[in-house]
Image (cartoon, grey):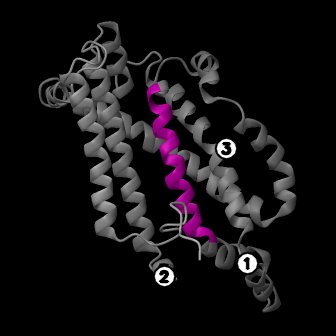
Amino acid sequence: MSRPSLWSFGLRAPVGRPQRMISGIGIWALFFGVWVTASGLGLVNDLLVPAPQKVFATTWDLFFARDFGGDVLISIGRVLAAFGMACAVAVPLGVMMGAFPWIEAIFAPFVSAWRYLPAPSFIPILLMWFGTGEAPKLALLFIGVIFFLITLIMDHTKTVREELVETALTLGANPRTVVLRVIFPSVLPDIVTAMRQMLAMAWTYLVIAEIVASTTGIGAMMMRARRFLNTDEILSGIIVIGALGLLFDLAFATLHRLAFPYLRTR
């Protein structure tokens, strides 16, 4: 009888909530512990990698003495506006492409080609088209999200069980009813999951969108800090973006759990 290896230990075994919390807190404690130790022992340059306590003190000062909260709200508004516009286009188009092969045949070559184009490469032309206002920033975030989101939703729609569609058609439902009453409700949990994944993509493009001809937002603050080598402010911006991304991710996870409780019992 062979002894179990490390690879087989806990394979696909569920993890309880207490263990998840302990593991999540533990990995962050380890990360900051290494950071504090490296800074305290002088293993890193304090100008380039300031100590965590200095970064947190700077973050406090930014919020309560320098009106950084206004920049954060502006950045959140940009992400939500662009992401909302992307979802308004991607959800119906992705579902239709997954439900009707002839629609996929029309749009798939176009969407697939745009997925491989890096969104930052559009910055020069967006500035030429829209100037330096809010429009180019929203357009960049929109471009960075929409084509991946369409593809994910289309692929999820294709996984809806065929017998559900055939049963509805047999019972006399027309294609419109099948899409709205059978396919869309079936794929909706996966759509929410895809939206959760792609919202993270929007946050990754936020700084890129705000470093170009912008005076407001988290990215603009980080670029001002770079000019004066204020690394602690740059790291503060990174931490704030990470924290906001985590909060939105948890919000989507909670929404998914509350909206689709039957998936937990399954």
Of all residues, the one furthest to the front in this rendering is: 1
- Residue 166 sits above or below residue 25 on the image: below
In the rendered image, residue 253, in percent from the top left (x then y), is placed at 42, 62
The residue at 38%/24% (across/down) is: 219
Q: Secondary structure at mark 1?
A: loop
Q: Is residue 265 magenta?
A: no
Q: Quadrant of residue 143?
A: top right
x 43%, y 36%: residue: 78
Residue that mark 3 sits on: 147
Residue type indicated by callout 1: Arg
Label 1 crowd bin: few (<14), some (14–19), many (20+), radius 10 Å: few
The answer to which quarter of the image holds residue 73 is top left
Q: For this rendering, which residue is in front, 103 or 245?
A: 245
Q: Residue at x 59, y 72 (%)?
A: 2
> Cα distance, mark 1 to mark 3?
25 Å
The 10 Å Cα crowd at callout 3, few under 14, some 14 to 19, many 20 or more, is many
Tell me which label, 3 or 2, sits earlier in the chain.
Answer: 3
Which residue lies most toward the top here?
228
Q: Position of residue 137 (x, y in %)?
A: 50, 28
Residue topped by disc 1: 161
Please identify, in this view, whether the residue under mark 1 or under mark 3 is nearer the observer. 1
In terms of depth relative to the viewer, which is nearer, 178 or 49? Answer: 49
Q: Secondary structure at mark 3?
A: helix
- N-terminal-most mark, 1 or 3: 3
Q: Is residue 211 visible?
A: yes
Give the amino acid type for the residue marked by disc 2 in the picture: Tyr
Compared to residue 233, the image places residue 157 above or below, namely below
Q: What residue is shown with label 2?
A: 262
Between the C-alphas of marks 1 and 2, the distance is 17 Å
The span picked out in magenta is 187-207
Q: Residue at x 58, y 68 (%)?
A: 188
Picture disc at residue 151: none
